[in-house]
């Protein structure tokens, strides 16, 4: 099945932080793929803007290197690369000073969409927004894209929102959460709201609980110092995992359009219960086989920051009261796997005498690896031996069902950048949503900081601290296996 690609209108995209890690790893290779697919037009321009001393040729060389490093060989085509580089230029600009801004204004063309990607530290969002506005580089049709982290607590998120709102209307602000750009995450909405099969069962009468797991095998690597100031709760739960939770839990929006969807997500965040400290488990990986511990990785032998967190979250509304959401995320776990599992209740009565098992259907939505969905159904075990039952998956791997093109679906970043150009905010977080998420997160973090709680140690390559397993066992439930 060949995907239909509709080119976007011509644009000037300025990437602040264009020489940085995120631009090199994700944004620039993503744009190249959009050009190769025919979605980014030849009239589009990408302008790198950063503090580094460079010029057009210097930046093109950096982009070329990034494409060689971060794109698989089969995606690189010399002719397309030459075309891509011809659409790229560079402006040296100081976000907090005066240098470079006139030059940037001279680069912008009339009559095309102007977008500004803030791939820089959040402390620079305000200064850049102010200069774009004051110097007439942006106008009321321009868009700005804000990278994570959007604040470290409610207060700082409010300040960022205020700084942006002073120069841009909310309809121009695209707060990126790349989880929302994942194919499966959007498919989750298609499955929920495009089928009659699931929605009638999507509530506390039929769903026993929901598990959301984002497991990584990597440690904190080179960003230890930064990470230690943040931790798993701020880095993963407040944004990505709450967004996933919202998409599972929200009421059907009246239309698939930005404010309808975001209104429903906001209602979910506002209905989240506070979490009892006994329902939260925090962890840090220990040293193993010559591999440093979390504390060694971050260079602080007394660090109390978590790189693992698991918790039980309740939603106080008619649909979900009594159906818990269990969330866990961590580093150096046994596999790299992200999954949402919707675990239905067991059948109310077992008519099969030979079978003593407890069977419940599970809808598993895999975000990585092998994006896809799987529905566990109970069938009769084949062969003689009476009515013994067996749980088997009805698998729907997108690559298998839709052919190889589906496996090459755009990466989350490139899809979201195209949405910015198209002016579609559906998959971006609204300011009030981000603030509501911090308003829920802050007291939990404040609680463990105030008590001076120390995270539990856990083995590298495990499923996290034993207490995280107990969190579920106490409720008579168990986590699903973390497997790649
Ligand atoms: P980086 O340190 O690699 O790059 C920073 C970029 O900002 C460079 O291009 C630098 O020249 C530019 N810059 C810094 N100060 C400037 C100034 N005063 N004026 C103009 N330009 C200036 O950082 P990064 O890893 O690319 O991350 C950028 C932002 O994106 C950060 O806020 C980070 O938290 C966030 N982020 C990064 C990743 C990632 O994978 N790297 C993922 C998600 C979010």
Image: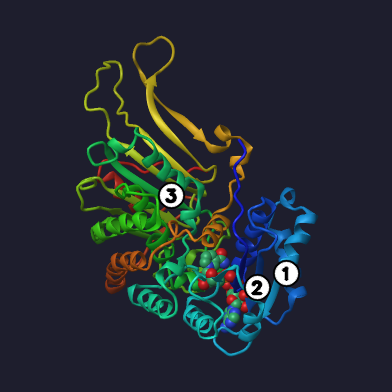
Q: Residues within 10 Å of mark 1 (few under 14, many from 20)?
A: some
Q: Earlier in the sequence, mark 1 or mark 3?
A: 1
Q: Secondary structure at mark 2?
A: strand
Inter-mark Cα distance, 2 to 3: 41 Å
Specify whether tag 3 is near ligand 1 (CB below 8 Å).
Answer: no
Specify whether tag 2 is near ligand 1 (CB below 8 Å).
Answer: yes
Inter-mark Cα distance, 1 to 3: 39 Å
Please name the residue that numbered disc 3 is placed on: 463
Inter-mark Cα distance, 1 to 2: 10 Å
Q: Residues within 10 Å of mark 2 (few under 14, many from 20)?
A: many
Q: Secondary structure at mark 3?
A: loop
Residue 397 is left or right of residue 151, and the answer is right
Q: Nearer the viewer, mark 1 or mark 3?
A: 1
Query: In this picture, is 420 found above or below 378?
Result: below
Please name the residue that numbered disc 1 is placed on: 62
Please name the residue that numbered disc 2 is placed on: 48
In this view of the protein, which residue sits in the foreground, 484 or 117? 117
Q: Earlier in the sequence, mark 2 or mark 3?
A: 2
Which of the four quarters of the rendered structure image does ligand 1 lie in?
bottom right
């Amino acid at each position: 099945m060949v995907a239909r690609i509709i080119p976007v209108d011509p644009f000037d995209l300025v990437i602040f932080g264009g020489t940085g890690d995120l631009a090199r790893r994700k944004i620039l290779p993503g744009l190249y793929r959009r050009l190769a697919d025919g979605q980014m037009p030849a009239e589009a321009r990408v302008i790198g803007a950063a503090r580094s001393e460079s010029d057009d040729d210097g930046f093109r060389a950096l982009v070329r290197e990034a494409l060689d490093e971060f794109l698989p060989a089969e995606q690189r085509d010399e002719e397309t690369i030459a075309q891509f580089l011809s659409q790229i230029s560079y402006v040296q600009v100081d976000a907090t000073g005066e240098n470079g801004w006139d030059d940037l204004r001279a680069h912008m063309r009339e009559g095309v969409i102007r977008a500004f990607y803030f791939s820089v530290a959040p402390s620079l969002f305000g200064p850049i927004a102010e200069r774009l506005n004051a110097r007439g580089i942006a106008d009321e049709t321009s868009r700005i894209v804000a990278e994570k982290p959007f604040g470290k607590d409610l207060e700082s998120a409010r300040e960022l929102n205020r700084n942006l709102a002073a120069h841009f209307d909310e309809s121009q602000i695209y707060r990126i959460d790349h989880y929302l750009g994942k194919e499966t995450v959007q498919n989750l909405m298609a499955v929920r709201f495009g089928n009659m099969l699931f929605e009638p069962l999507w509530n506390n009468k039929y769903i026993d609980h929901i598990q959301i797991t984002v497991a990584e095998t990597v440690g904190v690597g080179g960003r230890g110092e930064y990470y230690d100031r943040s931790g798993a709760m701020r880095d993963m739960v407040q944004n990505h995992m709450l967004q996933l939770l919202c998409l599972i839990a929200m009421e059907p929006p009246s239309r698939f359009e930005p404010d309808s969807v975001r209104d429903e997500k906001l209602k979910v965040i506002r209905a989240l219960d506070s979490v009892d400290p006994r329902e939260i488990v925090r962890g840090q990986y220990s040293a193993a086989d010559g591999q440093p511990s979390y504390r060694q990785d971050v260079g602080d032998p007394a660090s109390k920051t978590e790189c693992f967190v698991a918790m039980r979250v309740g939603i106080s509304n008619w649909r979900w009261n009594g159906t818990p959401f269990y969330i866990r995320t961590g580093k150096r776990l046994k596999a790299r796997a992200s999954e949402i599992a919707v675990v239905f209740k067991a059948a109310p009565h077992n008519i099969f005498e030979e079978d003593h098992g407890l069977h419940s259907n599970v809808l598993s939505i895999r975000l990585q690896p092998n994006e896809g969905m799987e529905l566990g159904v109970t069938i009769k075990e084949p062969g003689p031996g009476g009515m013994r039952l067996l749980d088997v998956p009805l698998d729907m791997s997108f690559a298998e069902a839709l052919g190889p093109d589906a496996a090459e679906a755009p990466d989350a970043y490139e899809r979201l950048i195209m949405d910015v150009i198209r002016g579609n905010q559906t998959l971006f977080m609204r300011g009030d949503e981000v603030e509501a998420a911090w308003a829920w997160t802050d007291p939990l973090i404040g609680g463990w900081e105030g008590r001076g709680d120390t995270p539990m140690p856990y083995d590298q390559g495990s499923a996290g601290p034993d207490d995280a397993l107990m969190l579920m066992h106490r409720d008579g439930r168990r986590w699903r296996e973390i497997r790649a």
